[in-house]
Amino acid sequence: MREYFNSDDWLIIEEGFEPEYNRVAESAMSLGNGHMGIRGNFEEKYSGDSLSGTYYAGIYYPDKTKVGWWKNGYPEWFAKVLNGINFIGIDVKVNGLELDIAKCTVIDFQRILNMKHGYLERSFVAVDKNNNKTKIISKRFLSMAESEIAAIKYSVIPLNYDGEITLNPYLDGKVVNEDSNYDEYFWEEVEKKAEDNLCYLNMKTKKLDFRVSCAMKYELSNKNDKFHPKEMTLISKEDYVANLLSVSVKTGDEITLTKYISAVTNRDYNNEDLVNKAVNAVNKAYESGYDNLFEAHKETWDNKWEENDITIVGDKKAQQGIRFNIFHLNQTYTGEDQRLNIGPKGFTGEKYGGSTYWDTEAYCLPFYLSTAPSKIAKNLLIYRYNHLEKAKENARKLGFKGALYPMVTMNGEECHNEWEITFEEIHRNGAIAYAIYNYVNYTGDKKHLADYGIEVLVEISRFWADRVNYNKAKDKYMILGVTGPNEYENNVNNNWYTNTIASWTLGYAMEALDYVKNEYSDIYYRLLQKLELKEQEVDKWKDIIDKMYYPYIEEEKVFSQQDGYMDKEQILVKELPEGNLPINQNWSWDRILRSCFIKQADVMQGIYFFNDRYDLDTIKRNFDFYEPRTVHESSLSPCIYSIIASQLGYEKKAYELYLRTARLDLDNYNCDSDDGLHITSMAGTWMSVVHGFGGLKVKDNELYLSPFLPKSWQEYSFRILFRDSLLNVKVGNSVIIELISGDDVIINVFKQKYTINKNNKIEI
Amino acid sequence: MREYFNSDDWLIIEEGFEPEYNRVAESAMSLGNGHMGIRGNFEEKYSGDSLSGTYYAGIYYPDKTKVGWWKNGYPEWFAKVLNGINFIGIDVKVNGLELDIAKCTVIDFQRILNMKHGYLERSFVAVDKNNNKTKIISKRFLSMAESEIAAIKYSVIPLNYDGEITLNPYLDGKVVNEDSNYDEYFWEEVEKKAEDNLCYLNMKTKKLDFRVSCAMKYELSNKNDKFHPKEMTLISKEDYVANLLSVSVKTGDEITLTKYISAVTNRDYNNEDLVNKAVNAVNKAYESGYDNLFEAHKETWDNKWEENDITIVGDKKAQQGIRFNIFHLNQTYTGEDQRLNIGPKGFTGEKYGGSTYWDTEAYCLPFYLSTAPSKIAKNLLIYRYNHLEKAKENARKLGFKGALYPMVTMNGEECHNEWEITFEEIHRNGAIAYAIYNYVNYTGDKKHLADYGIEVLVEISRFWADRVNYNKAKDKYMILGVTGPNEYENNVNNNWYTNTIASWTLGYAMEALDYVKNEYSDIYYRLLQKLELKEQEVDKWKDIIDKMYYPYIEEEKVFSQQDGYMDKEQILVKELPEGNLPINQNWSWDRILRSCFIKQADVMQGIYFFNDRYDLDTIKRNFDFYEPRTVHESSLSPCIYSIIASQLGYEKKAYELYLRTARLDLDNYNCDSDDGLHITSMAGTWMSVVHGFGGLKVKDNELYLSPFLPKSWQEYSFRILFRDSLLNVKVGNSVIIELISGDDVIINVFKQKYTINKNNKIEI
């Protein structure tokens, strides 16, 4: 952990350049707009250590699986979001000498991410070996308003010399994934052209024929006066096009190259139209000009922040931290494309392949539910609905009925290959069912059940009904051989959370069937036929619910993590001698598995999901038992514990746990932000504040809040969209709730009911 | 399964050539002499499918580990026995056309392994596209008498033409392992020379600097008349040397090339002497001549068979099968080198890296104990004694005291990388302790405990004492998170076999300490000091023995495989619909793990090891419970069940199970003999006959036998060496036991005691 960046309400500031920290800074300074994303790489050449990354949403590659010992049922490939055409590049030469920060003296280096308006700015003075001093200022954004457009202003200021500068804006398709399993190159060139002030490059993936076309144009100016280069050379080589521009400069000039970029893919257009689309888009952008493009981009960001900003008064670090999380969530997923989802690293790195995990349903969905129009969250559900056939195939492959959603996926097919995860971490299926409940409960869109929900719920239920096994001796249904959310135990029997969510799914599916039968009987009977669902099948579900086995620790009166949990040596995290934490870096895997230490919320995850089922005493006993045994070595853990701590009135604990996620990446808490940010856990941080400190719940179509103010804060506020009404909740000495837009809302605060309308804010 | 080879008492006969079965035949026809081994490859070029293999005992390569998801504690490399210099090669051209069976018509093909005298013979007529008919007869052996020597007689008979034949005997070091993880080439050339009638090649491994030097000489004759070639060309290229010999031939000539080969390694000599040693050895062999070399080789085999033949009258297939197993065991390990051990494929293939598994202690040791002088078995123990420091390091790496022997090893370091095996299949440690007991019990060499045994037993005990965990609630010691011999269950709690052998180890270590204290008190006190062993430590062992937890199935009155075994759905193998077996080819790994089906003897392995502890009723109940649940998908399984079935008088079952191993490779039972033979399980087959049908046991320095005759046999006999006395046991209508050599022996047959001496055979 290291507080590397300067604190600021809206900015992430790097002062001075530390080559060995460059990858972390690159991750933090990533830009994205849902359609594409780039790490905070330099435009000019940099020969030092860097993870160069340009990612295009939904463009992936089935990389051949790498495995030591094959197990029946493993997928043959692992889909990875591809590092694609690098479009930011601008090589610079000063009097023939290449500008490369790694090879010159750097003064006054600053790299600043502006979260309010979504751009990255960088400035420094480079002193080369001829003692030429050049100041560089660059500013870039990926347009939130027009997602296929990016623009860069790159200024070069000769401080102590006259001479010649060359600027070489390029598009480079010769890009590899660092995480390629067999060091393969995934792309091949389709088409390219380098003309004066119009270059394009069309690349395709070697498998699946995904195509990405980028086009670029440039503009040169000297302190706002546009001009043409002295000389322009077209460069066109394998997978690469560029315009090499020569400019004569004098001390004090400020030469600005504006680079306009378009990037389109064949996910949106036909192959044959792709180049045209890219060229038209970049021409249009060029005609608009940088300032207009930026203005539209800025406005979109203003609207986003209007919907989902959280303000914190009295703690600059906390303010910066929470905005950093919201900023990256907004960049990663805008919810307009049902085919997309949220990868654990978003567009900030390659780890985990940029694929979809159950993180989406368990952690990200609540964020989008409360901060964006309901169709955004709905699209996340439809993503899974569209993968239903593949999930059924996946279940079949493992010998089961119904649907088993994959642990990790891009197109609906499983691509993970650890048996204890791929085959056993089946609780993920429950999270997908729970997301349907969560969405319907929050939005009130019960029609969704008829249109999409039932099919998914029935197929998941069928899986559970086939996956349980009936234990005659105990007259109970059990679920053997699973890995719960706590991945520090593998292949256990009767993980309480898994058994709980499985049985809950069956019940919710039955409830949903009843609802659809009553409200949309025509759809209901169509569905019965389509699904070939018989009464006996549902009766079996009922029987499973009635006789589901839940491991319980009698002496402690708490739910048992799994059957064998209490046979383990019981130690608390605080009893571990120094140097043991994190155990995933200091212990053998074997020792971790045999220990009682819990990686991430497991029983607690269940208590969070099904909170209303348990009285406060039960929740307290379970929290008091499990929290001291939890090492939170998943970034997804502390937020859930923090929310429950808030509920229990453990305010200090809630805040302490919140801190573990809020600045996880900014302060590189786990020393692993170099390979990308923990995007999905950022939603957990938001949840800690809104569901935890704010106590937000939705029950029977009404909002519930029970906020408290963490001691070190003077005030905080958050915004929530509830069924088209936008509310602002400010928590300070009092709680003030305002309706910003939309219809009147019924809201329960500290168990008292209020109706809020535009003329009437509540102060409690 | 396929009965491909013709039956014969002493021969393995392949009639006619089937290219698609070539790899299986190559495996079966492998030759070895403890020092080196070759698969049954052709001498002349063969462009069809083949696994070319030449292996040198103890020459290995640390291949970089291949793993999908790294777990803390994994080794960085996997040691593999290397495919090294190919020394059998002789390229042949007939009137300029290369002889290649894949490219000509083949008539009367025969490949015959002679097990009695340890050689491989091959003959066929090749008709090439010019319609030239050439008969080839080749015969080769790796000398059992002089292990660094091999010789080949290769005869070429032009049947219908005069003309020119070239013969090109070569040494080729450009050899790869098919199982290389990253397609790397492991060798580089050190030195070579091609002179007229003396070529040598000295190769080294890229890592660890292992060196292998081969030298060769040749002799030409026409029907016994020696002659010189018309022309001789020296060939020397990268990693390759040869003498290309041109010979004018007439129809009816019989041109024989005798190739003499020596192969030495720097495991036995200094690097600088290596080439000299190889050259001297080959010169010496050349001077002796083929016939003398073969005579010495044959005599050694005669002696081997004298010690360990099993004869079966009335069932040729059974006779061939059992000899095939004994033959390959004798070829694989001769016991003269303490640094060597028995890889699961011996010298017959590359799979599993040719490394040492617990198979050696559990299955191979009994064979060598009863069929070879005791120093051979002792060397197998000393192999592990010499690895003790590495086993301690290995335990330390996983966070434990004492010694944990690796699952798979070459030099004592772990090289396997599946967490559920590497970290959890710790019962292997018990087998290494048990082997000490087994050796001492069989040979009476109790001094071994003082010299070697104690140290190993104490360090293994320390591991167990640290690996158990005390369960306060139950006042029991448990062993959590293990994989038992049944690898179809992973990461289970309290595998009965593991708990049993762990606690037994502690007891045996205590007993051994007592013995050494009483008999060799000087050594004892030296050992106490060396081991820093305190009384409290041993007291702790006592406590663990007293309070060890053994899972038990009350309803069935049998030991429970593991804690959760009875929670699984209980089905019998015979209830599985057709098409499910073998489950390892038809089921997902997940389904296998959750099933009650047992891969190999587990509770039964314990009952076999600690047979005297259990009354027949207990054994019967456990057998009756577990046998119907066992799928025997490890080649190591049926033998143990067969032995117990014999003990219970289930003669039919015993024979049926015996059949599953006896011709496992000859009939390619599991369709996997193409990549090598199941060498270690061959010892199990021997055990099925001698320990099972013969009922051999050793107790309190006395032999016990209780033989029965399988129904389909008329008679069988086996030989056993017991403390320097060689006995022949013949079982037919009566049981006849003869002392072939050595002192008088006390032997209990069907519970009656006899003393046997040279003049007095027993007939019962």
Image (tube, coloured by chain):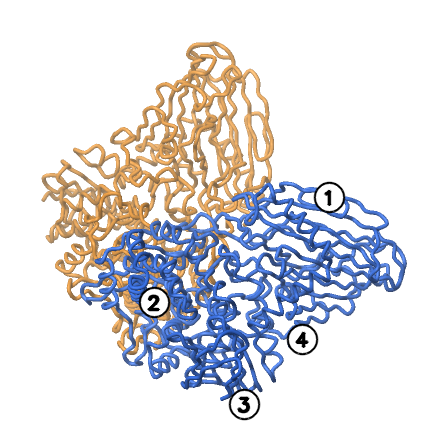
Chain colours: A orange, B blue
Q: Label 3: state its secondary structure.
A: loop
Check if mark 1 and mark 3 are on a common chain: yes
- Looking at the image, residue B181 sits to the left or right of residue B750; the answer is right
**Sequence-first tag of 2 and 4:** 4
Based on the displayed image, in which of its 4 quarters is residue A555 positioned?
Answer: bottom left
Q: Residue at x 54, y 65 (%)?
A: B679
The residue at which mark 1 appears reads as B194
The residue at which mark 3 appears reads as B733
Q: Quadrant of the C terminus of chain A?
A: top left
Q: Residue at x 14, y 52 (%)?
A: A648
Mark on residue B6?
4
- Separation (CA) of disc 1 from disc 4: 42 Å
- Please say if the residues under marks 3 and 4 sit with CB atoms less than 8 Å apart: no
Mark on residue B501?
2
- Separation (CA) of disc 1 from disc 3: 63 Å
Q: Chain of mark 1?
A: B
Q: Chain of mark 4?
A: B
- Please say if the residues under marks 1 and 3 sit with CB atoms less than 8 Å apart: no
Nearer the observer: mark 1 or 2; the answer is 1
The number of discs equals 4
Nearer the observer: mark 2 or 4; the answer is 2
**Sequence-first tag of 1 and 3:** 1
Query: Image height check: is A357 above or below B112?
Result: above
Q: Label 1: state its secondary structure.
A: strand
Query: Image height check: is B673 above or below A362?
Result: below
Amino acid type for the residue under numbered disc 3: Asn
Let me know if residue A452 appears in the view.
no
Mark on residue B127?
none
